[in-house]
Amino acid sequence: MIGQRKAILQVNSITKDFVRRGFTSRAQTVMRAVNNVSLQLFANQTYALVGESGSGKSTTGRIICALERPTSGTVVFNDENYTDFSDHLLRQKIRGNIQMVLQDPFSSLNPRKTIEHAVLEALEIQKIGKNHSERLDAVVDMIERVGLSSGMINRYPHQFSGGQLQRVNIARALVVRPKILILDESVSALDVSVQAQVLNLLQDLKQEFSLSYLFITHDLSVVRFIADRVGVLRKGELVEEGTVDEIFDHPQTDYTQNLLSSIPIPNPEHRQLAF
Amino acid sequence: MNDSQQERSLPASTQILESAETSKTVENIEHDARALLKVNNLKVDFSNSRHQWTRIVHGVSFAVGKGEILGIVGESGCGKSVTAFSILRLHERRTTRYEGAITFEGHDIFSLGQKQLRTLRGGDIGFIFQNPMSSLNPLLTIGQQLRETVRTHQPSLSKNEVESSCIEALHDAGSDNPESWMKQYPYQFSGGMLQRVMIGMALINHPKLLIADEPTTALDVTIQMQLLKVLRDLRKTRDMSIVLITHDMGVVAQMCDRVEVMYQGRIMESAPVSDIFAHPRNPYTQGLLAAIPPMEGLRPKRLKTVSDFLKQSGSDLSPHGNVMDHAAFTAKE
Ligand SMILES: Nc1ncnc2c1ncn2[C@@H]1O[C@H](COP(=O)(O)OP(=O)(O)O)[C@@H](O)[C@H]1O
Ligand SMILES: Nc1ncnc2c1ncn2[C@@H]1O[C@H](COP(=O)(O)OP(=O)(O)O)[C@@H](O)[C@H]1O
Ligand SMILES: [Mg+2]
Ligand SMILES: [Mg+2]
């Protein structure tokens, strides 16, 4: 089925090298953070990118979001290769279509600006909306859509809980009506009950706005709920890819098996540690 | 998956043995007035710069038996760390007010002098935190820091004895090469290795109780599992008690004998792990368990949330299970 549908985003053999200056000498070492990774996103689908810390998940996400350029390989959105786009072209054609939400809900919000300002700013950057009052309406709509009340829009980040702030970040990403949302560990720092609420919200929004998610996480326990397809990264390489059922029921590599069997099962009758 | 499948196909006798052991431990605690650690109706208040006091812990009671792993589980901000720090009176003296009683081996923590407290800290009671770097000096080798900890508590040991204590502790904490670890600096270690160093440091004076506050929260699951195994092994080989603080019900299920479920500074439910997972009685506990995305079986369209359960129950959050109240505690004395 996937073979027949057209991908909304194609990542073609991307590699990313970081050059590091030595600590003592001037010798440079090259660190390959992403190695020949290819993947595709389809409309209204969630692709989970999983792997241990340092495996290259965020770097891949940042390249797709055009915050970083790959050393080689291409990224293609709706048949358009944007790998080498200028800042101007990126703003015109990509930024409004591919948005990102990060792990730390505080880090991407200015503590001195209200959340109205934060969400409004996203619209202004994209030059969306005819005038201020039209933009303000869009902000209020989106704030309510993510489960916050419009009465909260004049508050500052520190007046919100982590879960609420993550809703603000989601609102800010979605207010420009992107096609793709990259969620980089976006629920990893949330408590389980809040996490469940945000995951439910993400499922609803995906339907409502026909979104594609790239769901980046080191925590496989949420992947089975949220994802359609899963890619497993290890040291920058995509070692395995498949549907959620394929990956969870028939993992092909020891690495994936180990990741899965290391999730503590919330059932004391199934003890995973030998005594 | 393989590991857990193997676990499941263990001969039935192994599993029965395991649960029999667990329930024996539990029985001991409930009826043994000589529990290692007892926290009775603990209340903790903090004052701000304007000398206004706020209560964070609202009367918490629990006991830890010898060789027992007690879990304290709850969401961020519910007061787990504040409770744990109170056990060693680690909070800033001027701005903290304690009520209630904490006894360790029958000694009243709140009437100990500063010197006795220091002997207890890192002596009979070891402590590990979520972020190992917060307790390590980046400028000293692991060996320098471990030796210092031994010397403070056991000044009479010879140089060789100190050295072998350090090596043994690192070994028990799961280091594959303690001698070389001793020579290295913290920056040369990964997060998982640093946490092993912290466990080693906590073990070094052979504590009877280890308080571990979210020791694996910042680590990858694969590393977490290795460290949990280290902790399980320690309780067996050293007959040590552990208070394991976590927000992860999976960790509780895998590690603990008993669990205290904490919410807004109170214990909501207290029970052996097998009971809590099979029959959670408090709506908050029910919600916490239901909100975990299932790893097998049908994939739900939506996850349940804690608020679903609080709504259902009309927010009846009165404590359930054998939550120790003040009266029960005194009766046992
Ligand atoms: N800007 C950078 N400069 C140098 N190295 C980097 C940079 N960003 C990431 N890396 C390195 O690339 C590797 C992959 O990092 P990352 O993509 O953040 O992994 P993950 O998100 O899976 O934890 C890591 O070893 C990291 O240290
Ligand atoms: N020293 C302190 N002074 C004032 N408030 C504190 C102090 N330490 C913690 N708190 C507050 O007490 C509550 C419980 O915190 P904590 O015990 O750290 O929660 P957790 O269960 O996540 O470990 C939080 O609201 C926190 O802000
Ligand atoms: Mg990352
Ligand atoms: Mg804490």
Image: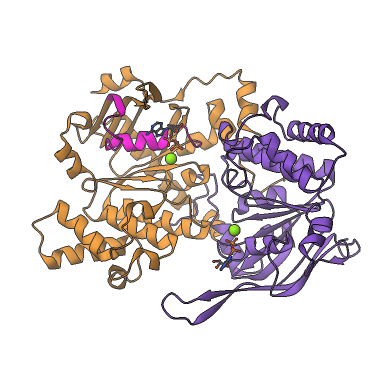
Chain colours: A purple, B orange
- Pick the residue in front: B326 or B193: B193
Image-quadrant location for residue B29 = top left
**Residue visible at 58% across and 19% down in the picture:** B315
Residue at 33% over, 71% down: B177
| Residue B13 x %, y % | 45, 51
Res. B2 in view = no
- Residue ranking furthest to the front: A131
Question: What stretch of residues is rendered in magenta?
Answer: B75-100
Count of numbered badges drawn on the protein? 0
- Given residues A249 and A206, the one toward you in this image is A206
Check the picture and name the quadrant holding the N terminus of chain A: bottom right
- x and y, in percent, of residue A239 in the image: 66, 70
Of all residues, the one furthest to the left in this rendering is B156
Provide residue B142's location: percent of width, then percent of height: 29, 64
Question: Based on the displayed image, in which of its 4 quarters is residue B330 positioned?
Answer: top left
Q: Which residue is pictured at 64% across the width and 45% down the height? A: B294
Relative placement, left or right, of B18 versus B328 is right
Q: Quadrant of the C terminus of chain A?
A: bottom left
Q: Residue furthest right?
A: A4
In the foreground, B55 or B120: B55
Quarter of image, ligand 1: bottom right
